[in-house]
Image: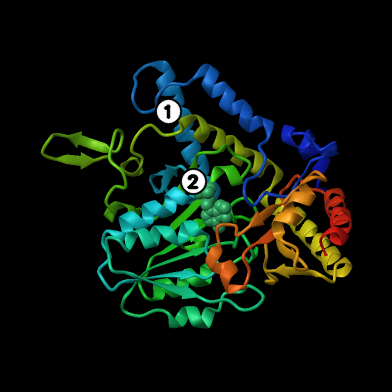
Amino acid sequence: MNFDVEYYRRDFPALQRTLYGRPLTYFDNTATSQTPKCVVDAIESAYYNSKANVHRGVHTMSQEMTALQEAARERVRGFINAESTEEIIFTRGTTEGINLVAACMGDSFKDGDEVIISVMEHHSNIVPWQLLQRRKDIKLRVIPMDECGVLNMDAYRGLFNEHTAMVSVTHVSNVLGTVNPVKEIVAEAHRHGVPVLIDGAQAISHRKVDVRDIDCDFYAFSAHKMYGPTGVGVLYGRKSWLEKMPPYQGGGEMIAHVSFDHTTYADLPFKFEAGTPDFVCIAAMHKAIDYMESIGIKRIEEHEQELLKYATERMAAEFPQIRIYGNAPVKDAIISFMLGDAHPYDVGLLLDKQGIAVRTGHHCAQPLLESLGLEGVARASFALYNTREEVDRFIAALHRIEPMLL
Ligand code: PMP
């Protein structure tokens, strides 16, 4: 495959740095990806040339910034194939998107209602529903998985009853890499008339996401995991649901008319965008999408899959002591592992000393880790700019640290 990774690496200044005199090997892409220069340039240009508040002024700079923000909304719409920009809500990230849905959809839930989530959810798709439990007597029902990290779809089908009000599951597990069959999950929920939220934080930069094909009712993701800026994200919501939902927060920009007695709300999507949005980073997210699409999401996915296969095979062949968690047949480029009984923090610290950044800990998925009988794991995850040479360096470093830890 003709994927000129060295060419793309030059777009990412952070990748040129060294750690402890060694070249940086950045394998913590699941937590956040590095940012290409075009995205940072867009931030600089907006701050230097057109920083004016959006949707507020008749003056030229305000109009320019508004145009940049709304162009980004149209770009996001096309990127995920939503029907209308009214369905694209700018948020602070995945977490805020899920909290918004839990709070606003939850408003109409009745005591006794149930929300189906899965065992592999990130805390940000567990805790918002638990916060709702302070207002409503709702139950969480959890889809189990098998030993490879594949959701048990029979068990899922068995969780529905007349109290099921919502399904909320992750597209891709940030620990196991499992790519969940979201179309099937949505189809089953819709057979019961139940809406579905998909947590797309880990899917959006690794595979093509088409919300109309998935047919989900909500889809949340963060820009910082897709080569974009920090602090912004997107919640896609089906228009018919967004129209029914009450606003999330109150403030400027989300209103049609305010009096001390009564307020009417702005049209979609602004009803859900109270206050000044991070319009600079929203404009920069546009560039991140352009960047990914200029390379091709499919090509990025193929490159990452090759790295996943290569690294997994070498780890399995060369380290009898390594256990890899997550062996689903459809899996994104995430490898969570234990090196014998070595503490994952020790693995992470020793790898760091060799210039290799991996994540360690519970990865904001404590219930999943507990179900595996673990407190933490080390996790290596790949992005478009990672190389086979970096995997070689990682394997060599593991060989070096193994005798120190076991
Ligand atoms: N869901 C999943 C599956 C994630 O991996 C993450 C980030 N680790 C989140 C949600 C939360 O994303 P953010 O912190 O950007 O809101």
**Quarter of the view holding residue 317:** bottom right
- In the rendered structure, the answer to whether residue 366 lies left or right of residue 87 reads right
Whole-percent x, y for residue 96 in the image: 43, 48
- In the rendered structure, the answer to whether residue 53 lies left or right of residue 343 reads left
**Quarter of the view holding residue 372:** bottom right
Whole-percent x, y for residue 366 in the image: 55, 64
Mark 1 lies on a secondary structure that is: helix
Q: How is the image coloured?
A: rainbow
Q: Is residue 180 visible?
A: no
Q: Is mark 2 within 8 Å of ligand 1?
A: yes
On screen, residue 89 above or below 192: above
Q: Is residue 22 visible?
A: yes
Between 177 and 212, the residue placed more toward the observer is 177
Between 398 and 325, the residue placed more toward the observer is 398
Which residue in the protein does label 2 denote? Answer: 93
Residue at 52%, 83% (x, y): give it. 154
- In the rendered structure, the answer to whether residue 174 lies left or right of residue 166 reads right
Between 386 and 320, the residue placed more toward the observer is 320
Q: What's under tag 1, amino acid-wise?
A: Thr
Q: Residues within 10 Å of mark 2 (few under 14, many from 20)?
A: many
Residue at 50%, 82% (x, y): give it. 155
On screen, residue 132 above or below 390: below
On screen, residue 330 above or below 404: below
Q: Residues within 10 Å of mark 1 (few under 14, many from 20)?
A: many
Whole-percent x, y for residue 44 in the image: 58, 23
Whole-percent x, y for residue 274 in the image: 33, 38
Q: What's under tag 2, amino acid-wise?
A: Gly
Which residue in the protein does label 1 denote? Answer: 66
Between 305 and 28, the residue placed more toward the observer is 28
Mark 2 lies on a secondary structure that is: loop
